[in-house]
Amino acid sequence: MTLTAEDAHRLEECVAGGGVAVFPADTVYGLGCDPENRAAVERLYALKGRPPARPAAVMFFSLAVALEALPELGVRERAALEALLPGPLTLLLPNRNRRFPLACGPDPDTLGVRVPLLEGALAALGAVRVPVVQSSANISGEADARRLAEVSASLRAGADLVLDGGELPGTASTVVDLRAYEDCGEWHIVRAGPVAPSELERVLG
């Protein structure tokens, strides 16, 4: 199912209005809300049954918006984001200005950043200008959803907006720790996913 500019507008309005949305990304279906709205973030966590102490990523729907929102990025970090994103990755970065604290759980000095690769049927979502706290659209501990029908009925019923992007690849993002990358070039994979280690080595050294 191909998403439209109207779908992107509805997602922006839902997030800006304090709602929680189910939406497709380049990996699996996600659950998202305004990362600055405590009530919305608490509701997202409650819908998933996710422990409040577990951090979530902040998703930007375009790389330009992400870079604009994070002007404190170092030279190496910015180059890494420009080389790796958009794509099926979550990058753990130093949160020097302690942005988006509601997404960071017990570690306000670390920020997880996602910029999905929105192509084909999902391309319209690239126009979304607001970030979201993003977690997979599943009950905590259950399998990720590749199709909308695989998203728990309770999550779909509890969300304010549900967008159907058809069948997705189905593998959650690769998580890469870049917290020491700016200072000494060190990085490591926290969770394996769609991006091969050889590709990360090629880009990050």
Image: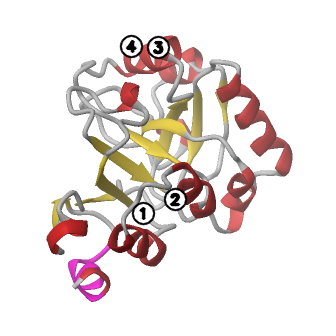
| CB within 8 Å, label 3 to label 4 | yes
Query: Which quadrant holds residue 177?
Result: bottom left
Query: Which quadrant holds residue 163?
Result: top right
Rendered position, 153 above or below 205: above
Q: What element carries label 2?
A: loop
Q: Earlier in the sequence, mark 4 or mark 1?
A: 4
Q: What element carries label 4?
A: helix
Q: Mark 2 points at which residue?
A: 116
Q: Name the residue under label 3.
A: 43
Amino acid type at circle 2 is Pro
Q: What element carries label 1?
A: loop
Mark 4 closeness class: few <14, some 14–19, many ≥20 residues within 10 Å = some
Q: Mark 4 points at which residue?
A: 46
Q: Earlier in the sequence, mark 2 or mark 1?
A: 1
Q: Which of marks 1 and 3 is nearer the N terminus?
A: 3
Task: Left or right? Give the position of 69 relative to 109.
Answer: right
| CB within 8 Å, label 2 to label 1 | yes
Rendered position, 175 above or below 102: below
Q: Which residue is drawn at 66% across and 43% down?
A: 164
Amino acid type at circle 1 is Pro
- The magenta span reads 195-202
The answer to whether residue 198 is magenta is yes
